[in-house]
Amino acid sequence: MARRSGTLVAEDVARLPGACATCLHWERVVDAGAVDAVERSNGGGEAAEQVKRRWWLESLSAGTVAGMVARAPRGATGNGNSDGNGAGAAVAGYVTYRLPSGSGVDALTVLALRVDAGCRGAGLGRALVHQVAREAMRRPRVRAVEALAARVPGTPCLVPLDFWLACGFVVVHEHPLTPRVRLDARVLAGWRTEVEEAVELAWDRLRGVVRPEPAPKPALTLRRR
């Protein structure tokens, strides 16, 4: 079976959709000092893509951040090699997140989430959120998934608030532009049987097996026991 998704590795940076391959916004949010150190280590002569790749290589090794990528099926994107086979395939979509650190932190924090323009409308963004939720459920000390959302459409590097609400998140910290949203462990527990189904359905839509859904489905609710 063609490899369709997997853990983000440093080599994926050059294949990220849109301008993400050269954007250092979230890297600076996580640790601006580390990004500056990477830039200075080569006399400031590296391109942003090279700085980003080296930062991710170091950060993945340190276990401070992680990510998931979805590989594009043949012809789905114009972003690099789209043969859909292995790590050399184009990236149809990706999500990155910061791992909990410190005694008071109990959530995986989503940093970037983006789907290639040619792969939108198939539910792939929602499927990536499901995969982050699955990762959260595997970690005993993680109680939730959190993210910053955009109230104003087109806010750079942020996903619209409506998307997160449709995925079951709730606003836990109000802000006129960038509220913080959270999906807690009780809701995650209700996703256990839906995660694989959602991912498979997204890939079927992406390959054209079924018609894309025009809008996100209503948020998943807790199952009564």
Image (cartoon, rainbow, N blue to C red):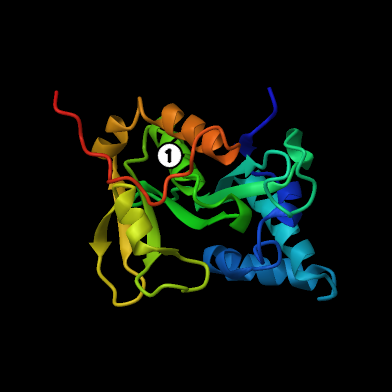
To which quarter of the image does residue 153 belong?
bottom left
Provide the secondary structure element on which disc 1 rests: helix
Q: Is residue 21 above or below residue 47?
A: above
Coordinates of residue 108 in the picture (x, y in percent): 42, 48
Q: Which is more toward the observer, 65 or 43?
A: 65
To which quarter of the image does residue 165 belong?
bottom left
Residue 100 left/right relative to 63? left
Q: Quadrant of the N terminus?
A: top right
Q: Is residue 28 above or below residue 96?
A: below
Residue 220 left/right relative to 62? left
Crowding at dot 1, Cα within 10 Å, few <14 / some 14-19 / many 20+, comes out as many
Residue 79 left/right relative to 193? right
Question: What residue is shown at x 37% (from left), y 32% (from top)?
Answer: 140
Question: What residue is shown at x 70% (from left), y 27% (from top)?
Answer: 2
Instruction: Identify the residue position indicated by label 1 in the image.
Output: 130
Coordinates of residue 90 in the picture (x, y in percent): 72, 47
Coordinates of residue 222 in the picture (x, y in percent): 20, 35
At label 1, the amino acid type is His
Task: Tell me, yes or no, if residue 176 can be seen here.
Answer: yes
